[in-house]
Amino acid sequence: MACGDSDDRADSGSSALGSPDVQLTAREADCTDWNEASVEQRQVIVDSLAEHEGGPTEAGGTGATLPDEEAYDLFDRACAEESSRAFKLYKTYARAAAFQQAAP
């Protein structure tokens, strides 16, 4: 590659969250991103967080997750205030999921 050439590795067909329209990782997304996202982009965020937070734990189990509708409602409420624009969605998600009842 010549000096000054652009090496744009963020091609429009891929993203950390699985959609070319959502160019974030689960740990980067904040309330500003949520408020600016389309319904489809919001679903990608919720799915990515569930996958990330529901993964294997050091104790040998899996992490707690929220049903999609609860996660969506949680972010709508948490991100409604202007003062919450920098809140990281993964932190909000993980804290809420920790209070979910374990399945019997």
Image (cartoon, helix red, strand yellow):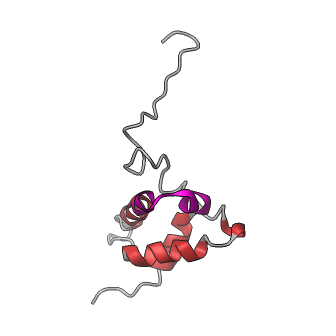
Asked whether the viewer can see residue 81, the reply is yes
In the displayed structure, 18 sits above or below 87; it is above
Residue 39 colored in magenta in the image = yes
Q: At which x and y percent is residue 20?
A: 41, 44
Closer to us: 82 or 16: 82
Which residue extends farthest right? 83
User: Which residue sits at x=53%, y=71%?
Assistant: 75
Query: What's the residue at 40%, 61% (across, down)?
Result: 52
Tell me: 60 left or right of 36. Answer: left
Task: Give the dominant element type of the magenta stretch: helix, strand or loop.
Answer: helix
41 up-or-down from 23: above or below: below
Residue, far left: 104
24 over 32 or under it: above or below = above
Residue drawn where x is 50% and y is 78% of the image: 96
Q: How many marks?
A: 0
Percent from the top left, x then y, of residue 24? Answer: 50, 49
Q: 98 and 21: which one is in front?
A: 21
Which residue is rendered at x = 49% and y = 72% of the image? 94
Q: Quadrant of the C terminus?
A: bottom left
Q: Residue lying furthest top in this view?
A: 2
Q: Is residue 57 magenta?
A: no
Answer with the quarter of the image where residue 34 lies.
bottom right
| Residue 66 seen | no
Numbered range of the magenta stretch: 31-43
- Kindly give the residue lying farthest to the front in the view shown: 38
Residue 81 in the image, given as x and y percentages of width and height: 67, 72
Q: Residue 60 appears at what percent x and percent y?
A: 32, 69
